[in-house]
Amino acid sequence: MTMHAMSAIEPTSPPPGVLAIRADNWRLAIVAGLALSIFAALTLPASVSFWVVGVAAAMIAAAFVVNAYRRRYYGGLLVAPAIAVLFVMNIFPLLWSLGLSFFAYQSNQQSIRFVGLNNYIKVLTNEIAAPGNWSALVNTALFVVLTVSAQMMVGFLLAMLFAKQFPLRKYLLILVLTPMMLSVVASGVFFTYYYDPTFGILSYVMNAITGGQFILMDSKAGAVAGIVFADAWMWSPFVMLLVLAGLVSVPKYLYEAAAIDRVSAWRRFWSITFPYIRGLLMLALLFRTIEAFKLADLVILLTKGGNDTMTISYHLIRIANEQNKTSEGAAISYVMLFMVIVLTNLYLYLANRRNQES
Amino acid sequence: MSMSRKIKGAVTAAGVVASLVAVNPTFVRAEEVTLTMAVPDWPPTRIMKKFFDEQYKPKSGNTVKLDVDFIPWPDFYTRVNASLTSGEQKYNFIVSDSQWLGAFVEGGYFRQINDLLDADPDFMKTFMEIHPNPLNAYATYPHKSTNYYGFPQFPDVLVNFARKDVLCHEAEQASYMAKYNKKLPCTGEELDAMTWDDFNNVGEFFRRKKGEMLAGKPADDDFYGIAFQAGKSYDFSSMQINGFIWQMGGDVWDETKVPNGQAEGVVNSPEAVKALEKYLNLIDYMPPVAKTGTMDIFKSDELFREGKVAMNIDWIGLGEASLDPKSSKVSDKLVVGMMPGTMGADGKMVRWSNIGGQPFVLTTWTTPQQTAEAVEFVKWWLSADIQNQFAAGGGQSAIKSVYSDPKYVTYRPWNRAWAASLDWQKDVWHVPQFFELLTQQQDQFDLAITGKQDAKTTLDNIAKFQQSLLTEAGLIQ
Amino acid sequence: MAYGISIWERLGIRKSSGVSEAGWGHTAFVALISFIYFLPVLFIIFTAIKPQGLALSVPPTLSPTSLLGLIPEQFVFTPTLENFGSVFSRVMTAGSQPEATGFDRFFLNSIVIATASVVLALIFGTLAAYGFSRYPLKGNDTYLFIILTTRMLPAIVVVIPVILMFRTVGLSGSYLGIILLYTAFNLAFTIWMMKSFFDELSTDVEDAARIDGSSEVKVFFKICLPQVVAGLAATFVFGLILTWNEFLFALLLTGPDTRTVPVAMNQAVSSGGRGTDWTLLAAIETLFLIPVFLVTFFLQEHLLRGVTFGTVKK
């Protein structure tokens, strides 16, 4: 997309009639593209018709682009490539699995049958299937609260440490950033080592202190602590980096002015610093919450869901992957999606309200 | 080249070939055939690939390539399952756990091989050389029917890995004798004769804190007598517990009795409860990690190799690492016996165990030409010569003529326990509901292992779940 | 800096204001905390240079050097580079010669796939973020939220459709497929992150430039982009880190030729018919850490420079 040409276009022309064969007539393009696609899907083998449909989609997209370009819909033009990639690689598969959640379908069987909301009813109320889902959801909520708050706090405090200029700052910062660069497999497996009662460092130290046999992972409290510690350790640097990016963007003169006015540190933070990091804090909170909802790999590596640490995401892997109950898995994941959406909307609502207040 | 010219060219070429074949019936064009195989990444499959590349000469005159996708063990099921169920049709051969057969046969992915066996007497003869227990476990679906699917890749059983330096030490021998009025098992034969009660004694006997005397020296770390699998993931407790249940007269849900076999009343029978209690009692004598529910087959093996336990019941497939001085502190102290049994009321030893190991299977989309080459390859793989080489290189063989050869026991320390163990192996759950049965049972066993509920409750919960699931699936009436 | 102020002032170390200078006292304090935070990583790196037999020793060996007698002898090990060799070539079956493990290829794959997808995501995402920020569409927030929802579901949910789609189009096992997938995977974060940076910029300068006759293209490249370099750097780093370590899609959608390191790494978790090969796993992870570590290190200059010019808050 050449934006240079864009600025040199003729003034907005009136939209074309539906049947006018013009490059910017997206309505005609949709009609023609749809007709072509349906024809191809009905008559040609799948491997050929896929490409025909692809060409039709490209034609429609091209018509939209030309239309947007002639009428200066820059917003649409700028957003389009990203949306296109997202749609093909992400939204389309998501819609597919949403569709599957209304069918009785197992990926290792050939039959498929429409069952309406039955999967949802099953995962929420069935005597055998539902208790596992609910307890996994409760555990997930526990993990989300603990690990996200730990990450926000540790990340914030670390960012405060690094917000100044001081000697060797960049060398120390990279040390703190490293944990999140580790692959979860490696760090998870090494945490099983750190926590191991026979070989591990933690038990070695604790045994030396208490003289007894220390086993971290033999109770729910210990297992949750172990998982949360590992997760928060890995991802606090993420929060820190976002907060730090905000902190360093606060113009110095604002602080200088505040210093002259003898503003208290507390007020200085809320009136000067906070507005600059609010958006980024929100972003960190949003993304860490979403990721925490998906917590599965560390649980699998550290406890396999033992000691009542099963999370909904790990439960989902068992249902959808191990047991191939595809549509039941899809139903669980959309229940989960619903909860995450409610939660994130709540965040965004609160953030916006604060925004308007200040 | 335009489309029509391409087609014309192809037609002409086909005509030429057809006439050549017609003129000279013995004319065979050497073609390149690729067999794609999904295997877990470990020595038994690496050896297979190596032998193939070095030694395999197809009789057909074709160039046969074995394209092996080595997938790390922890992700093997995920990868294979996704490949099969998505209809990717990528692999011709798949190494499969025996219990996956039901789900993948019902899904239409695994190819039945009866027609191939019937068409080729040589193949049938080789196939029937396999010991009946592994044959039933690895090849049949429904279990113990004559519908055949797989060939042994790496057959496996549970054996007792032990440390002779500790067990044979005079001081330990003497004090064990004083305490239990029995000889502390020390040789392979003595290990073979062990019951779970003896195993219990060994566990109780060797519980040494760091600094206490062990085999004439102060122990450099806490030391334990016994270990076996007691982990929550995959089948890392069921495979051990099943042996206890069968040995003590209980049973698991028996798929060969469909539709009359029940779960309620069988799975939670008093014998089964007693067996599980026995299993759980032994855990008290094991290294502390057992209490976390993460002592899987790898962890107990690791504890053994690091010299923290005197005996470990584990799969032969994990044995190689304990022989390698680089990965094992006990490589020169190893003695191996059969898994312990239970003394019956009649004074005879009752032995049962759950078989391990993996078959490999053909997939349904394999073309006739590939299938023909695959059969030749499998015949070669199961031939006595190759199986002997495989065993010599660290594999195991279920072929009678191979494992009954006197030199078989000389290959590895555990081979002495192999042939006898094969006779009392059973297998469970080739049904498509395998994973549901397994995960629920493993979760329940984990609660018992970590001390959250007793044996009775555990088995009651399992029985109730199985009864409901299998009734719904039409396997119990 | 705002928070620490009262503490630091009370301690009398330094009176600070804004992004200010602090002295060696602060350095010492931060160094201590950073070192503690880094310890679990350091242990992995040390495990990579341990002799295999010491990986599980009790007491654990902690350091390749006794630091002039500071660390008791029982915690010290003699370093070796052997494990790094094992990553690329080692004995796979008892009694045979070392074989190539293919890790050179896996490393190359990881670098190509991660770089290409993060750069693509950054290009598409930054354009989109600029669009969302400066030319809001009808229902702008809804679009943004839908984009965010693509990150909310565990990958396992979309795996089957994606595999099917890839097979139909012939993308499975190809670089293009996994790169496009990762691009999509990174877009949500890129768009949200870059939008928040664009939102923070004052539009006064841009408007002034427009009045002076600058084209939209020029406004974007000459005025807006330079102000969000920190944002670009941070987004690149995050995207790289997440993509670098992605596991599930890589497992299911790459073939033997396009396999990435996180998938192949499990070779060491269940290694040659046993459990974890600790020194091998540590060696792989240590090598795997280096590229992303270096990129982060060199980008943090930008990251920390801050958006100092022209930032008049709206």
Image (cartoon, coloured by chain):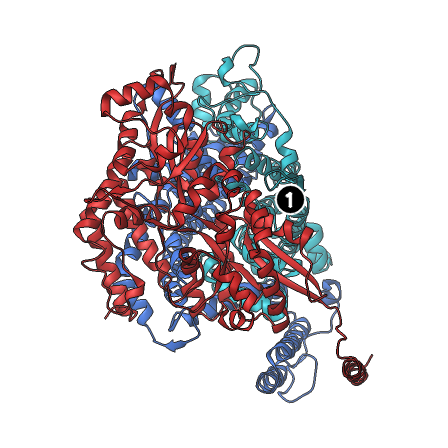
Q: Which chain is red?
A: B
Q: At which x and y percent is residue C147?
A: 51, 61
> Is residue C141 placed above or below B162 in the rendered structure?
below
Q: Which chain is cyan?
A: C
Q: Is residue A81 visible?
A: yes
Q: In the shown orientation, is residue B360 left or right of residue A318?
A: right
Q: Quadrant of residue A132?
A: bottom left
Q: Secondary structure at mark 1?
A: loop
Chain A pictured colour: blue
Q: Nearer the viewer, residue A272 or A44?
A: A44
At label 1, which amino acid type do we have? Thr
Q: Residue at x 67, y 88 (%)?
A: A20
Residue at which label 1 appears: C101
Read off the chain for label 1: C
Q: In the shown orientation, is residue A224 left or right of residue B318?
A: left
Q: In the shown orientation, is residue A279 left or right of residue C187?
A: left
Q: Quadrant of residue B187?
A: top left
